[in-house]
Image (spheres, rainbow, N blue to C red):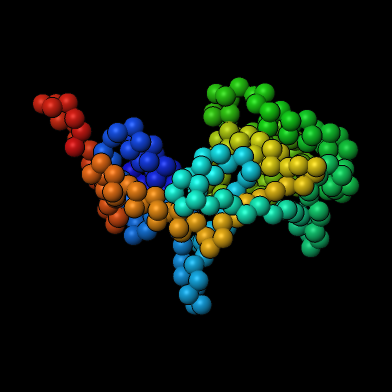
Amino acid sequence: VGAGYTGLATAVYLIDQGFKVYLIEKSNYLGGLGKIVKLSNKKLCESFYHHYFINDKYLIEFLKRFINKTPTYKTGSMSIFSKNNYYSWNGLLDLIFFPKINFVSKIRFIISTIILSKGFLNKKMLDRTSLLKGMETLFGVESFKAIWEPILYGKFGSKVDVIPLRWMAGRLKQRIESRKFGEEKLGYMEGSIFRLTESIAKFIDKSNQSKIYKCSQIKKIIFNTKISKYK
């Protein structure tokens, strides 16, 4: 149910295992947050900004398998915008010279980042703790207010309360592992992710009588006791 990239990847996995798949998508497009719009100059553009990390193993495998392409990697850079000023945010030195938190908060920031990104926290705790509560508890109020709170509300909006702390654990791990010699390498797909989405959709439609239904919605699932199957 749902033809975002989680649904598309799941469908491919099931087809590879020999199953027939019906993929149901409520909207009239595939790819979820990978949605594509056509600009006035006829070029395709992703509706949401995306980049790919060098350790995005499964995405890279899909790109090679379905369109024989790999992302183009470029050196990325970040800044924090606070009270009409930009502060570089690309490494340890930037944290040390960041004026919005004190020395103790900076040490705590480093320790908490290591704890969260290296998998030292209990998995159940990561799933049961909300992102907001977990980040404030780990990093402290000062760092949370100055750095994390604006970022998290900017990304998730009103849904931020239902996001588990596990999301940040995974994201920090990705970002740290995408760095080499202090520089972060981020991947981009030339011409958008549209070709990959279309290629996966064609694969599903041509495989084992599988089918994608767009503009469709499941309203009810019934278990048939006579044949022990859902319909």
Residue at horizontal 83 percent and vertical 38 percent from the top: 106
Quadrant assignment, res 6: top left
Which quadrant: the N terminus?
top left
Which quadrant: the C terminus?
top left
Residue at horizontal 62 percent and vertical 45 percent from the top: 53
Residue 82 falls left or right of residue 167: right
Residue 219: x percent and y percent?
Answer: 24, 45
Residue 40 falls left or right of residue 180: left
Of 112 and 175, the residue lying toward us:
175
Is any part of residue 1 visible from this angle? Answer: yes
Q: Specify the farthest residue to the front.
A: 68
Q: Specify the farthest residue to the left.
A: 226
Residue 36: x percent and y percent?
Answer: 46, 62
Residue at horizontal 51 percent and vertical 77 percent from the top: 41
Of 61 and 43, the residue lying toward us:
61
Of 130 and 121, the residue lying toward us:
121
Is any part of residue 131 visible from this angle? Answer: no
Of 86 and 55, the residue lying toward us:
55
**Total numbered labels placed on residues in the image:** 0
Residue 47 falls left or right of residue 115: left
Residue 101 falls left or right of residue 197: right
Residue 212: x percent and y percent?
Answer: 29, 50
Residue 229: x percent and y percent?
Answer: 19, 30
Quadrant assignment, res 221: top left
Residue at horizontal 82 percent and vertical 37 percent from the top: 105
